[in-house]
């Protein structure tokens, strides 16, 4: 028997469209297989349900009276909810921004119309210690671990901490209820 004649690389009697279809079908099957394998691997990287539940917290501000602070746990960190006195608000507003390590106006750290409520992440920005209220030189928080002093707006005033206490994202759901996160 003789070999089939070749015409420029194509065997006479073969259909080139059939070969192209097989290549495309094999490629599509491979892409589908990769998708089926990758989907569970990617979805397992999503946060667990208990983590998503901690992503936000609701708090009733009616539990905090003037001059008081409540500490709640949020995302594994302490969260300070402080009802500031008019004197504390005035002290925070009167500070010249040029005196601050991390300049930020008090008005940028609270919501307009609710200036008495200050909500802060209670972790020192130096090494993550938990500052105590009322022990510092500026009427605010003091971190006893390394000596950082914060004012009544949670802004760093003295010590090794480089930044102000963080203000988390939050919104008021009503006059007395706030959603954090």
Image (tube, rainbow, N blue to C red):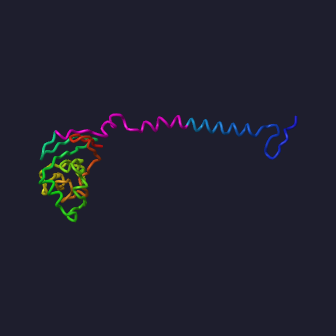
State the residue in front, 116 or 155.
116
Work out whether residue 26 or residue 93 is closer to the camera in this orientation and state it: 93
Confirm whether the magenta stretch covers residue 51: yes
Q: Is residue 27 above or below residue 126?
A: above
Placement of the C terminus among the 4 image quadrants: top left
**Can residue 9 be found in the magenta stretch?**
no
Which residue is depicted at the point 18% across and 58% down? 93
- Which quadrant holds residue 6? top right
Q: Is residue 166 above or below residue 73?
A: below
Q: Quadrant of the N terminus?
A: top right
Q: Main secondary structure of the magenta part?
A: helix
The spot of residue 175 in percent (x, y) is 21, 42
Q: Residue at x 26, y 51 (%)?
A: 166
- Left or right position of 27 against 67: right
Q: Residue at (22%, 50%) from the top-left corner?
A: 113
Residue 33 rendering spot, x and y as whole percentages: 56, 35
Q: Position of residue 128 (x, y in %)?
A: 24, 49
* Residue 2 falls in image quadrant: top right
In percent of width and height, residue 16 lies at: 76, 40
Q: In the rendered picture of this protein, how many numbered marks are placed on residues?
A: 0
In the figure, is residue 70 to the left or right of 39?
A: left
Q: Farthest residue in the right direction? A: 1
Q: Nearer the viewer, residue 45 or 70?
A: 70
* Up-down relation of residue 142 to residue 3 (above or below): below
Magenta stretch: give its range: 34-62
């Amino acid at each position: 028997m003789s070999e089939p004649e070749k015409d420029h690389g194509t065997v006479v009697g073969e259909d080139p469209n059939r070969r192209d279809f097989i290549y495309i079908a094999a490629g599509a099957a491979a892409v589908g297989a990769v998708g089926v394998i990758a989907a569970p691997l990617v979805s397992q990287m999503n946060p667990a349900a208990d983590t998503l539940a901690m992503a936000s917290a609701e708090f009733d501000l009616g539990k905090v009276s003037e001059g008081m602070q409540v500490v709640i746990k949020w995302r594994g960190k302490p969260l300070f909810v402080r009802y500031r006195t008019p004197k504390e608000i005035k002290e925070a507003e009167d500070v010249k921004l040029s005196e601050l390590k991390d300049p930020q106006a008090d008005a940028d750290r609270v919501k307009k119309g609710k200036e008495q409520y200050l909500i802060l992440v209670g972790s020192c920005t130096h090494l993550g210690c938990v500052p105590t209220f009322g022990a510092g030189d500026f009427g605010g928080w003091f971190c006893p671990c390394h000596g950082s002093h914060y004012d009544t707006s949670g802004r760093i005033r003295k010590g090794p901490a480089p930044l102000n206490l963080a203000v988390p994202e939050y919104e008021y759901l009503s006059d007395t209820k706030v959603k954090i996160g």
